[in-house]
Image (tube, rainbow, N blue to C red):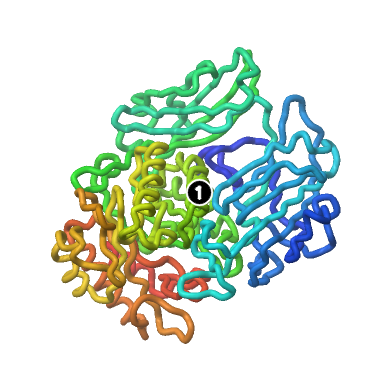
Amino acid sequence: MAVGAYRKNYPRPQFVREEWLDLNGEWDFCFDDGHLGERERWHSNFPAGLKIEVPFTYETAASGIGIPEFHSRVWYRRKVAVPRQPAGKRTILHFQGVDYKAKCWVNGTFVGEHEGAYAAFSFDITPYLAYGEENDLVLEVEDSQSCTQPRGKQRWVDDNFECFYVQTTGIWQSVWLEYVHEVRIDSVKMTPDIDRHTIRFDFQLTGAERREGLTLDTRITLNGRQVAQLNLSADRAWVTVEVNVFHEAGGPWKQSLWSPQHPNLFDVEFGLLQSGEELDRVYSYFGMRKISIENGQILLNNAPLYQKLILDQGYWPDSHLTPPSEEALIEDIDSAFALGYNGVRKHMKIEDARFLYWCDVKGMLVWSEMGAAFEFNDRAAASFTREWLEILPQQYNHPCIVTWVPFNESWGISTIARDVRQQRFTESIYHLTKAFDPYRPVITNDGWEHTVSDILTLHDYVESGEEFLERYRDKDAIVNNEISFNNSRYAFAEGYRYTGQPIIVSEFGGIAFRSASGWGYGNQVGSEQDFIERFRGITRAIRSIPYLAGYCYTQLADVQQEVNGLLTEDRRPKIPAEVVREING
């Protein structure tokens, strides 16, 4: 079932190379509450301290430390034996996720820094390594409780509250080395066009300006059979490949498209050659699919798409934001399917690339949502924009992603209803997103108080189906801001109006069983039968409203004090999956 030269636990399945080294595992670790590390040159003289299991943060049990209290600065060290340097090769150090500001040293020499919790980043550490010997990798990470940094569901006070959980500080996704040629393929942006039966590849190369006679070899296969192969000069930055021949490799054209029912994926290899000598080879994949909006409907591959989504926060009991394993990611996807959903709204988190890979493979739709800041000022706007523009190209090629969600419930833009500056900020993010990716819908402020947005989404936690039907009986009253949500929040911010967008109830439900300390939305229920009756009533009411294009139930699994999942925090079902699936239809 796997595609794209799949390798278990490979951190970046959309862009695979052969030569890499996993650096997850035991690292040396120190807290630096006095901010002494740089002054005392810990990058050269690392103090005796703790051990930590990377990529789990010190707050988690999985890290081996399990201290939930906030610490503003932490340090890591790992000794790495690097083989003798092959001619023309470079060594790249990759971090898939570090929260929040990272500084890196190799053998005592500073090599670079990065700010942002959710975007992957890397450093070329070739000049700083002692090849054939053991090397010191040191990372300092600075975090804060500031609400100007995009933090998602991480708390900014000392204790959990409402729907905000233990913070994440430090390395929280994989660390790895990659050995690459000095002339190489940096990235390939892949854009399918099912109407023209083409796929466009936009190449970014490193070091090519210093070489002549470079060519790019591209080979596409479907189910092991070659679909197309072409060779072009590397001084051409893009190429469009016609895919009419897919008929020969995969049968009827529509059966070769990607969808939840038929998640067809094409393998693709990119080779960079000079005078016939291979300098670089990358393995990837793509899906031929189209997401579009026409006449108030969302279309997938030019056919109406009714989205049955479940909100997924991607937390686990012992590892928090970090998935405990690749199998855990697969289990969550399979659980969502078993419950009758065809997509997930990945809430307030940019998820592990392996999750998106398995959604691509299995056909799970994904709404990709940025972690919010919780204040608005120039610094917050700049930090958000910078990181969002890093994330977009890192996720662009995944066919499973069908919607971008940069903002949620006016978090970080709390006065957007009337504040022109905040309105303009959301417009700018919308248009920047569309400039990079004009093909996917963008939701600007999921839940209410939309500005410019491709979909109108509403969050509504009323408890009965009858109340849902009464509230949504008059569509015009909702879209014209005559009906409010969540204490006088309206569908649109002032100065904006409905222009025929599809409408989705993108949060509802949140039903919790009676609990002494945990919480859910509305009154808690006392029995399985009470849960099923309430769940059936509100779900079927939403499904019966003809102008709605879908829904998103809150939520897949419990998260710390929030106990309104269909599964417990350790993924045990509260209600039989077949009952939920039958209600979802």
- Secondary element at image label 1: helix
Left or right: residue 54 versus residue 86 is left
Q: Is residue 268 above or below residue 142?
A: above
Left or right: residue 386 versus residue 61 is left
| Residue lying at 37% horizontally and 36% vertically, measured from the top left | 288
Q: Do we see residue 334 in this rendering?
A: no
- The quadrant holding residue 134 is top right
**Circle 1 Cα neighbour tier, 10 Å, few/some/many (<14 / 14–19 / ≥20):** few
Q: In the image, what residue type sits under mark 1?
A: Ala
| Residue lying at 44% horizontally and 70% vertically, measured from the top left | 567
Viewer-proximal residue, 481 or 233? 481
Q: Do we see residue 44 in this rendering?
A: yes
Left or right: residue 73 versus residue 507 is right
| Residue lying at 79% horizontally and 46% vertically, measured from the top left | 80
Q: In this view, does 389 lie above or below 486?
A: above
Q: Position of residue 332 (x, y in %)?
A: 47, 60
Q: Position of residue 113 (x, y in %)?
A: 67, 46
How many numbered marks have been drawn onto this rendered protein structure?
Answer: 1
Q: Where is residue 160 in the image (x, y as percent from the top left)?
A: 53, 74
Left or right: residue 400 versus residue 54 is left
Viewer-proximal residue, 109 or 211? 109
Image quarter where the C terminus lies is bottom left
- The quadrant holding residue 33 is bottom right
Report the residue marked by disc 1.
382
Q: Where is residue 579 in the image (x, y as percent from the top left)?
A: 33, 70
Viewer-proximal residue, 104 or 556? 104
Q: In this view, does 522 lie above or below 395?
A: below
